Amino acid sequence: MTLMRATSSVEETKRAGRELASLLTPGDIILLTGPLGAGKTAFTQGLAVGLGVSDRVTSPTFTLVRQHQCANRQGIAVLHHADVYRTNSLDEIEDLALEELVEVGGVAVIEWGEMAAGLLGRTAWRITIEVVNDDERTIVVDEASVGERLAMMQGWAAQ
Ligand SMILES: Nc1ncnc2c1ncn2[C@@H]1O[C@H](COP(=O)(O)OP(=O)(O)O)[C@@H](O)[C@H]1O
Ligand SMILES: [Mg+2]
């Protein structure tokens, strides 16, 4: 079984992100994949709302990574939001030290993250947003990457 959730508007993609947020715990890293305009940032915006971020989340293109303070029940203090589209340098991505950053009570979302997978020593959630047409997307979660949260993610996918 593959974990998939279809959306037919940007709002629905944001809602998928918001609902995923409640399943996250400190230390999680999400690798988001999908073409330009797929909805990676929209998904992250929803996720940020779910984590209790109150400032605006935009693509951190020129800084590679931005931090947002969070307020939520699961004790996630910071959302680290990276977009590595403009770098081909694995060294530069490694320098972000995302694994160390999330260790102290954060989570990280990396847009164009498939490139970063090999750098991470731990399992990261792999999420791909596929473009079906102008308004429709399919959010595909690699079920092998979600570990013991598979049952909860099946509930998320069934929405
Ligand atoms: N179902 C959908 N989910 C997400 N975005 C959608 C959807 N339908 C249309 N869109 C549009 O696609 C664009 C997604 O942009 P963005 O989130 O910045 O993509 P990315 O970060 O993947 O490049 C937005 O303009 C949004 O309005
Ligand atoms: Mg983006």
Image: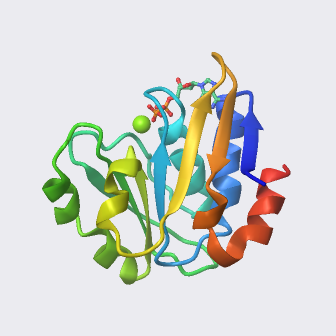
- Residue 119 percent across, percent down from the top left: 29, 64
Q: Residue furthest top?
A: 134
- Which quadrant of the figure contains the N terminus? bottom right
Residue in the picture at 54% in, 34% down: 39
Q: How are the colours assigned in the image?
A: rainbow
Which of the two residues, 123 or 19, is positioned nearer the viewer here?
A: 123
Picture coordinates of residue 89 (x, y %)? 16, 48
Answer with left or right where residue 83 lies relative to residue 8: left
Q: Where 21 falls versus 65 (above or below)? A: below
Query: Would you say 28 lies left or right of 134 here?
Result: left
Q: Position of residue 63 (x, y in %)?
A: 21, 47
| Left or right for 103, reference 147 | left
- Where 25 sits versus 91, above or below? below
Nearest the viewer among 68 and 130 is 130
Q: Looking at the picture, does residue 74 appear above or below residue 44? A: below
Q: Residue at x 35, y 75 (%)?
A: 121
